[in-house]
Amino acid sequence: MALTGLDIYKKLPKTNCGDCGLPTCLAFGMKLAAGQAELSACPHVSEEAAAELTEASAPPIRLVTIGAGDSALKVGGELVMYRHEKTYYNPCGIGLVIEDAMADGEVDERIAQTKAASFERIGQTLKADVVAVRSASGDGAKFAALVGKVNDALGLPMVLMAENADVMKAGLEACKGANPLMHGVTGDNCDAMTALAKEHSCPVCVSCADGIVAAADITAKVEAAGIKDIVIEPAWDSPANTLKELIQGRRAALREKFRALGFPFIAFPCKQTDDTYVETALAGAYIVKYAGIVILGSLEAAKALPLVVLRQNVYTDPQQPMQVEEGIYPINSPDADSPVLVTTNFSLTYFTVSGEIEASRVPTWLIVMDAEGLSVLTAWAAGKFVPDRIAKFVNRSGIADKVGHRKLVIPGYVAQISGELDEELPDWEITVGVREAGDIPPYLKQMTA
Ligand code: SF4
């Protein structure tokens, strides 16, 4: 049974020196028990205690870094089965596969697709963040040439796919320092691949057609050889088995503390179908159910956009509403005479309201107030979208410099604050707008007619 924070605390030096970055040994013990800290952060723990605590303090799913520098991808490190229990921390990497048997034109197209798969949503850039390079030819020189080309063109974390150690070696030589994930460690090539991984300090991906039970034997062997950064590929013979093993793997690591499966997973829907819609649906299922990386056959916008948006929604803290930045949002090229509407920064509110304004084609200033990501009524009830705060926001927003008039439209749901807001903003004329976003277009058209 796993040790509690108090159990761990009893084995720590109890000096509260703070060298671990936490104020007390108890706080450090609690973090260790939750898998949110590494024992190595305490330089004062005795050898005897370290030996006892190593097992208990290791994170249930190892955090593995692929790639280097600012674009490095961190996968794993998750602590819960269900997002509502806490949150998921490290978003699933999404990318496509490029093979060395492809014609130059196809390679260039896939590189271009990867670059183009970048979208702005709720103040974040959502994009492809990994690329797989596969040796289909079995020719080391061809593989190396493609790895070098993809690395130069994209600079993204790479998954190098080759089961022949000589071919893999050629690929690794072509991207020194890039810290790629070596995919294709099997029971047969384990010794040669782990030797390469040690030489190049790279993470490895254990891939076993017989599924994760057989893969667990290989991960134990790889770990024993001194490689700690491991990713596992679940069974790929059918989508149902892939999904089943992704779930079983997460459950075994978190609930059963089964260390041999305590690693992030990678899934390849590109191996399972040629149908782009089916592939997108499979990738979505794998993103939701625990894949740390998903590799697709292609990444055109119609496929990439829903997947990166799904990932964004899954990997947000459910206790922190999604928010947009406070500020002035000009919609439909407004000018000094355009109406000014105010709302809160709950992302759903913003997107609904801004979408309706856009659809109305009426040039409008939407000013969005930081209400800690709450919707209009909730923010009002919580005292965060109330007259004095709205007045301060309007004054600091700078909207008065953008318009010649002093007319402010508030959401119909908070009509009750209009009188008080009138007093807080004596220079402004407060108008109560509509309650439902769907009524905004006719309201704006009538207002500006
Ligand atoms: S570094 Fe070690 S001894 Fe110092 S506060 Fe942290 S856990 Fe305690």
Image (cartoon, helix red, strand yellow):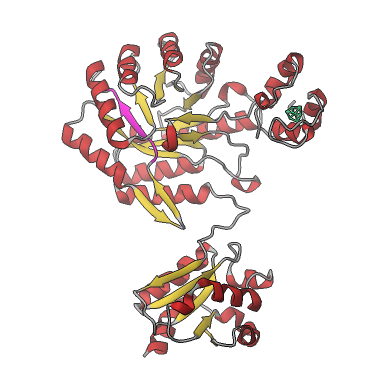
Percent coordinates x, y for residue 247 in the rendering: 55, 35
Q: Is residue 389 left or right of residue 175?
A: right
Residue 244 on image: x %, y %: 51, 34
Residue displayed at 65% across by 73% down: 380
The residue depicted at 60 percent of the width and 77 percent of the height is: 391
| Left or right position of 54 against 282 | right
- The residue lying toward the viewer, choosing from 447 and 79, is 447
Residue 3's x, y, as percent?
A: 76, 27
**Quarter residue 170 falls in:** top left
Outermost residue, top direction? 191
The answer, for residue 254, to whether it is visible in the render is: yes
Residue 380 drawn above or below residue 408: above
Which residues fall within the magenta stretch? 129-135
In the image: residue 206, left or right of residue 249 = left
Considering depth in this image, is 80 or 357 the residue closer to the camera? 357
Q: Quadrant of ligand 1?
A: top right
At a point 61% along the width and 22% down the height, the residue shown is 259
Q: Tell me: residue 70, above or below residue 346.
A: above
* Image quarter hosting the C terminus: bottom left
Q: Specify the quadrant that holds the N terminus.
A: top right
371 over 288 or under it: above or below: below
Picture layout, residue 202 above or below residue 347: above
Residue 439 visible, this angle: no
Residue name at image x 44 percent, y 9 percent: 191
